[in-house]
């Protein structure tokens, strides 16, 4: 897929999107967010977006079908930074550059909203995500010990790498 084939459309996540979001979440994460986690984020006013192909480029029955959810993200705007809480691309559409394009759009939102930094947590075992964030200029600024559930049966937990990137703001 080339960039000219499909531009991303960031649409505010609605309650009606949650079944499609949860289907991708369930097959994408060791410890997926629950419907309650997403509902709470929406109720709290977090910036939640569903990413689909733009309607004017839609092709029913293909990956360009506007009814097919490509990806989603949840952002928490704090006073002086944007916290990326969740970003997930459908497994069928990985390795096509969608996450990089989403991150560029998120950085644009941060700049537009005058937020000089984006911060996120990532599992060290999620080597693809860590590599992507590093490639995009994110740097590790800390570790949150035992942050993620790792093995529900054993009760093991995994640390989180805390990564951040400064965003250039127009003066």
Image (cartoon, rainbow, N blue to C red):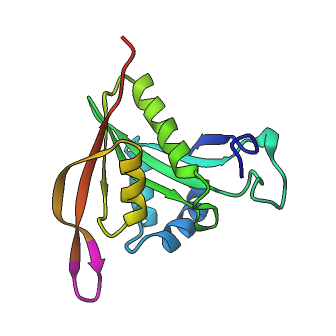
Query: What percent of the width, then of the height, locates residue 139?
Result: 27, 45
> In what quadrant of the picture does the C terminus appear?
top left
Q: Is residue 130 above or below residue 47?
A: below
- The residue shown at (43%, 53%) is 132
- Residue 107: which quarter of the image? top left
Residue stretch rendered in magenta on the structure = 149-156
Q: Is residue 43 magenta?
A: no
Query: What percent of the width, then of the height, locates residue 31?
Result: 37, 72
Q: Which residue of the protein is positioned furthest toward the top in this rendering?
A: 171
- The residue shown at (78%, 54%) is 65
Q: Is residue 90 above or below residue 157?
A: above
Q: Considering depth in this image, is 151 or 108 the residue closer to the camera?
A: 108
- The residue shown at (37%, 44%) is 44
Q: Is residue 157 above or below residue 64?
A: below
Q: Which residue of the protein is positioned furthest toward the right in this rendering?
A: 60
Q: Is residue 155 magenta?
A: yes
- The residue shown at (50%, 66%) is 25
Query: What percent of the width, then of the height, locates residue 18?
Result: 56, 59
Relative to 69, is 47 on the left or the right? left
Q: Which residue of the protein is positioned furthest toward the bottom in this rendering?
A: 153
Query: What percent of the width, then of the height, locates residue 127?
Result: 37, 65
Total number of numbered labels? 0
């Amino acid at each position: 897929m080339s960039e000219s084939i499909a531009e991303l459309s960031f649409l505010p996540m609605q309650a009606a999107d949650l079944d499609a979001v949860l289907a991708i979440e369930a097959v994408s994460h060791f410890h997926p967010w629950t419907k309650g986690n997403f509902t709470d984020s929406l109720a709290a006013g977090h910036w939640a977006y569903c990413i689909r192909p733009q309607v004017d480029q839609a092709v029913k029955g293909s990956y360009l079908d506007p009814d097919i959810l490509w990806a989603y993200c949840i952002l928490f705007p704090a006073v002086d930074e944007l916290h990326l809480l969740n970003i997930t691309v459908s497994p069928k559409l990985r390795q096509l550059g969608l996450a990089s394009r989403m991150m560029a759009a998120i950085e644009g939102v941060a700049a537009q909203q005058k937020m000089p930094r984006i911060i996120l947590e990532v599992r060290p075992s999620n080597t693809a995500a860590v590599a992507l964030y590093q490639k995009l200029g994110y740097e590790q600024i800390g570790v949150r010990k035992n942050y993620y559930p790792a093995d529900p049966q054993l009760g093991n937990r995994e640390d989180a790498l805390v990564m951040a990137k400064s965003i250039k703001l127009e003066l």
